Amino acid sequence: MSNGLYQQSGNKKDSKTKTNKPSIVNIVNVAVAVIHYKDQYLLGFRDATQHQGNRYEFVGGKIEANESAAQALIREVAEETGILLDDNTIVKLGRLHHDYGDKQVSLQVYKIELTAEQYEQHKHRNQGLEGQALTWVAKSQLLAGEYHLPAANKTILEWLKLPSKIAITYPLAHFGTHTDAAEAWLQYYQENLTSESWVYIRLKETNFKHLACQLITARPDILAILPNDNEQSLDDEELLTANETKIGQRIVAKHLTHSTLMQCFDEDGNPTALTQSLSKDRPLIVSCHDIASITVANKLASMRIQQGLPPVIGAFVSPVLATQTHPDDTPLGWEAWSALAELVDMPVIGLGGLEPAMLDQALQYGGISVAGIRQFI
């Protein structure tokens, strides 16, 4: 069953003449499969004669009452493409909610990487089992918007930009034994950051914001996450005055700490002035430690989508394991971390005592990425 009907408003049923009968809200749950092999992604194509025709779409369909989202996804993909996903790792990307008045739709989005054998078996098939056209497209072309997808997929494409690993910088205090801590910090990261990596530049000391600009200038290959909280405000205006159109293009997201996130709504659930001041031109990444902060993160994510703002593209959920940075914090452990990750409506990033080699473990427990300080340089 194609999922295109549920990824965009404009259902033919919605266009029928309305009656005076009381409306009954119908919640439709849909499983969406973002299937890929390395940087090749599978898309279906809706024929021009179909509703929402001439659009590409991810494979998927309606979740039946007697099955989980993962079960529905496995069934739908098998029915539509013949690809069997029973033994593949199915990773939750997130959930998207849409209200069409008489119908509420919840898209449960999952990412699945095929094995080399599966890809070889299916890469030349240009037609699905239901007669629909199938095509494999490069991730770069997909993210560049070269394929016309339903509007709801805009957020999914933003999620897909998130890398598998994120480095976080030490604060300046870590280099306090050097004669010039700022110069030592800058030299360390200029020389040691992995090429093309995503880096959360968190200095903590507000008097040294210019170092972020200097690092991005010295390493134009990196993509930067910058704070968007009271602790270390680094606004775009300041960047752009320092010879910075190119620097602005290298900032991929703003980050909210746990404490800042919890100030986004008042006791009645209304957005605060802080929420209104959050970046309106860049996606957000938030930090969550518990159910309360995850609830706020989900609400913020939903609000930004409704307002047409860049979405929340990821959530650091921590600490997974014990860390040297916060030795007094009780680690969640993988099982408890996984339970929290399941509640998050956007991609989950593991943080706390991790190293890059633990990515596969994070995928098994419901994360999409791992991050850290010491082991990620």
Image: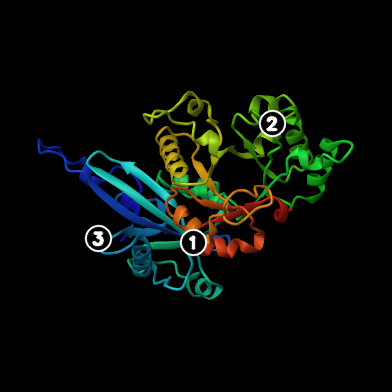
- Which mark is nearer the camera, 3 or 2? 3
Left or right for 46, reference 104: right
Residue drawn where x is 48% and y is 50% of the image: 147
Query: Mark 2 sits on what residue?
Result: 245
Tell me the quarter of the picture where residue 86 sits: bottom left
Query: Mark 1 sits on what residue?
Result: 335
Q: Amino acid at mark 3?
A: Ala
Query: Mark 3 sits on what residue?
Result: 65
Mark number displayed over residue 180? none
Left or right for 236, reference 178: left
Residue drawn where x is 45% and y is 26% of the image: 272
Task: Give whichever of 195, 18 is nearer the camera.
Answer: 195
Left or right for 147, reference 327: left
Task: Give whichever of 55, 273 is nearer the camera.
Answer: 273
Q: CA distance from mark 3 to mark 2?
A: 51 Å
Mark 2: secondary structure: helix
Give the mark nearest the N terminus, 1 or 2: 2
Q: Amino acid at mark 1?
A: Glu
Circles 1 and 2: CB distance less than 8 Å? no
Residue 217 place in picture, x, y as percent: 77, 37
Q: Amino acid at mark 2?
A: Thr
Give the mark nearest the N terminus, 3 or 2: 3
Circles 3 and 2: CB distance less than 8 Å? no
Mark 3: secondary structure: loop
